[in-house]
Image (cartoon, grey):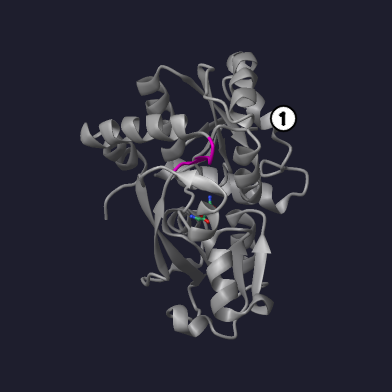
């Protein structure tokens, strides 16, 4: 996991330099890093999806926000991680090539609704509000909202967050639930989790609420921070597709079931997350 820690450290350094925009919404440069050879057929399949027809292309475009280790992050100019590997395994099952588009987390739902991408794999939690706009496959992983604080913090659990400034990643469940529970005035939303962690390090916020695996990765890469041993919420991660794209939803669910059954999903998770 040392490699991951280094990468996260690099991402954090990026976050503090304005010129480094790996989380910017301009997906052009990011998509170039994915297998760009398939971009022609990719757009064909996207158009079909956007118009509500069956997916006929042989390329699946996965949308993500590649600042969420170990689910998705950059290794050089490649996007790697649990979600990237699962998408690839699904593509192999379905005989389709997978390309990855990196964008802001809060652009993903619109991107899949409009057919810019075919599916979202972004450690995305199934929520009733999101289900009004997209369809979710069966779940492939569990996420926990964790609390990161400085080592000397007096905050020991969710109840102590009351009245404190909380940093979150924009549009995530951490953002939504903290705004509901502690009031919008106490919550500061950042474009990426790395930016929220940077704000904690510089004292702009007193805690960061974010999914547990990225939380662990960020703490590993930063001195003086810890993840509290309490669960704020427990959530299911699933793949989001456009509501009208029922054919893709069915195909993904069938492939996902096979990949769970034969142990592929677990071995991908184990590759990136070491058991405690
Ligand atoms: N699981 C959280 C959500 O779905 C965060 C996901 C992310 O930041 N990539 O809102």
Left or right of 87: which side holds 105?
A: right
Q: What residue is at 66 percent from the left and 75 percent from the top?
A: 184
Foreground residue, 245 or 257? 245
Q: Is residue 77 visible?
A: no
Q: What residue is at 43 percent from the left and 35 percent from the top?
A: 249
- Is 251 placed above or below 104 here? above
Q: What residue is at 41 percent from the left and 42 percent from the top?
A: 137
45 within the magenta span: no
Name the secondary structure under disc 1.
helix
Instruction: Please report the bounds of the magenta region as a residue range.
Output: 239-244
Foreground residue, 98 or 66? 98
Q: What residue is at 54 percent from the left and 37 percent from the top?
A: 244
Foreground residue, 82 or 248? 248
Left or right of 24: which side holds 181?
A: left
Q: Quadrant of the N terminus?
A: top left
Mark 1 = which residue? 28
């Amino acid at each position: 996991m040392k490699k991951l820690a280094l990468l996260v450290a690099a991402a954090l350094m990026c976050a503090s330099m304005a010129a480094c925009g790996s989380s910017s919404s301009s997906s052009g440069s990011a998509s170039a890093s994915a297998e760009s050879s398939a971009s022609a057929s990719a757009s064909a399949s996207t158009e079909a999806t956007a118009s509500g027809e069956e997916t006929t292309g042989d390329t699946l475009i996965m949308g993500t926000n590649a600042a969420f280790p170990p689910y998705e992050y950059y290794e050089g100019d490649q996007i790697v991680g649990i979600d990237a590997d699962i998408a690839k395994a699904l593509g192999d099952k379905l005989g389709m090539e997978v390309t990855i588009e990196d964008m802001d987390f809060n652009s993903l739902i619109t991107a899949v609704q409009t057919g810019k991408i075919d599916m979202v794999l972004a450690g995305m939690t199934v929520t009733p509000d999101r289900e009004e706009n997209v369809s979710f496959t069966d779940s492939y992983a569990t996420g926990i909202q964790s609390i990161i604080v400085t080592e000397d913090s007096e905050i020991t659990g969710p109840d102590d967050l009351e009245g404190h400034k909380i940093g979150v990643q924009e549009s995530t469940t951490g953002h939504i639930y903290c705004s509901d529970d502690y009031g919008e005035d106490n919550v500061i939303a950042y474009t990426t989790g790395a930016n929220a962690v940077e704000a904690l390090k510089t004292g702009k916020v007193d805690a960061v609420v974010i999914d547990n695996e990225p939380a662990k990765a960020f703490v590993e890469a930063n001195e003086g921070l810890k993840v509290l041993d309490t669960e704020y919420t427990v959530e299911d991660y699933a793949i989001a597709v456009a509501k009208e794209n029922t054919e893709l939803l069915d195909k993904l669910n069938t492939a996902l079931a096979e990949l769970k059954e034969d142990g592929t999903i677990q071995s991908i998770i184990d590759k990136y997350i070491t058991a405690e």
